[in-house]
Amino acid sequence: MEGYKSSEYTSEVRTSKDKYRAGASAHITVTEKPKAETEADQHREEWDFEITESRENEKITYIIRGVRGARSMIQSYTLKPTEAGTEMTFAFDYEASNPIFWVLFKLYNYFKTEKDIERALEKLKSILEK
């Protein structure tokens, strides 16, 4: 989702590494403005986020609760060094709140997630190449 995002850690964070350790959690607020961009047309969602697995420079897995149409979502990123650079694998699973949402959610996220990841990787690449 594009739009204003805010987050507040709900677990204790004493160092920057604490943000990425297993058990770290946060409450996230996302507000999306549709094309009309009026305040009345804004869509707001609140999610709870918890890291369930974290291996520095290798893998991070987290669960998100509170996403509309899903009981929970699990996302995982795995990094593997290669001769050409780094290979990233993204895994995504979710438990839908009903069968209709499952089909719609799967189609929506198939296209949206792929575009979001491509956009994020391009942004990261441009930052690293500076």
Image (cartoon, rainbow, N blue to C red):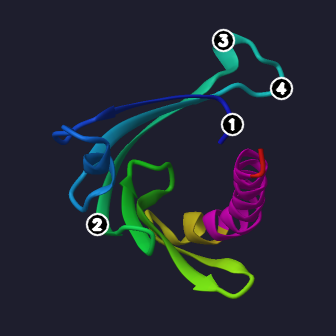
Q: Are marks 2 and 3 in contact (CB under 8 Å)?
A: no
* Residue extending farthest top: 39
The C terminus - image quarter: top right
Which residue is located at x 74 percent, y 12 percent?
Answer: 38
Check residue 2 in the rendering and tell me which mark sits there, or answer none.
1
Residue annotated with mark 2: 52
The kind of residue tagged 2 is Thr
Answer with left or right where residue 42 lies relative to residue 79: right
Earlier residue among tags 1 and 4? 1
- Front of the two marks 1 and 4: 1
The kind of residue tagged 4 is Lys
The quarter holding residue 121 reads bottom right
Q: Are marks 2 and 4 in contact (CB under 8 Å)?
A: no
Earlier residue among tags 2 and 3? 3
Q: Residues within 10 Å of mark 3 (few under 14, many from 20)?
A: few
Which residue is located at x 54 percent, y 76 percent?
Answer: 79
For the residue labelled by badge 1, is the local secondary structure a helix, a strand or a loop?
Answer: loop
- Front of the two marks 2 and 4: 2
Check residue 90 in the rendering and tell me which mark sits there, or answer none.
none
Region rendered in magenta? 104-128
Label 2 – label 4 distance at C-alpha? 36 Å
